[in-house]
Image (cartoon, rainbow, N blue to C red):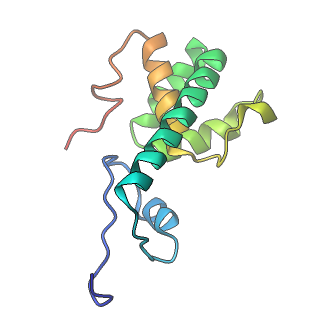
Amino acid sequence: MSKDKDIRFISTDTRQTKAEQDAVMGAGELMTVTPEQVMEFAKMARERKIGFDLVAKKKMTRERALRIKELRATLSWRGVAGITFLEWDNIEPNDEWYPETNQLMGMALCEAAAALLQENSEAYPWQATT
């Protein structure tokens, strides 16, 4: 790819802000990865998500689920995770919620909240419509 061309960041989260995209992209440098590295990254993400699922389910209450639903109406998964991290007072070091705006944690929070509210986490308002 030519350095003169614009680099586009692709995300399935349509509520992601430009600032979030810039934070993920850093200086805009792209790295080349092999198919094996992609598979390793996917394995690491899957394991991390399982841990986040456990934390989200353990700490979820009806009040928290309603708040997360309210947040998700306008925020990305990263936004939901960041605000929730600030609002919840029982985050423990062994929860490994880092960074506070971790996209996988935002997804876990939304899924746990939707389940507690007996809603479909794959439908609006949990997923943005395009």
Please determine whether, in this image, residue 39 is positioned above or below residue 116.
Answer: below
Please determine whether, in this image, residue 35 is positioned above or below residue 103.
Answer: below
Q: Position of residue 112 (x, y in %)?
A: 50, 20
Q: Is residue 69 left or right of residue 48?
A: left
Q: Is residue 54 left or right of residue 38?
A: right
Q: Is residue 129 left or right of residue 43?
A: left
Q: Position of residue 84 (x, y in %)?
A: 61, 36
Total tally of numbered discs in the picture? 0
Q: Which of 103/32 is in front?
A: 32
Furthest-left residue in this view? 130
Q: Which of 60/2 is in front?
A: 2
Q: Position of residue 60 (x, y in %)?
A: 60, 18
Furthest-front residue in this view? 36
Q: Position of residue 39 (x, y in %)?
A: 40, 46
Q: Is residue 87 left or right of residue 4?
A: right
Specify the quadrant of the image occupied by residue 102. Answer: top right
Picture residue at 77% right of the left edge, 30% below the top:
89
- Quadrant (top left/top right/bottom left/bottom right) for the C terminus: top left
Please determine whether, in this image, residue 17 is positioned above or below residue 50.
Answer: below
Please determine whether, in this image, residue 90 is positioned above or below residue 34.
Answer: above
Furthest-right residue in this view? 93
Picture residue at 36% right of the left edge, 14% below the top:
119
Q: Which of 22/48 is in front?
A: 48
- Quadrant (top left/top right/bottom left/bottom right) for the N terminus: bottom left
Furthest-bottom residue in this view? 4
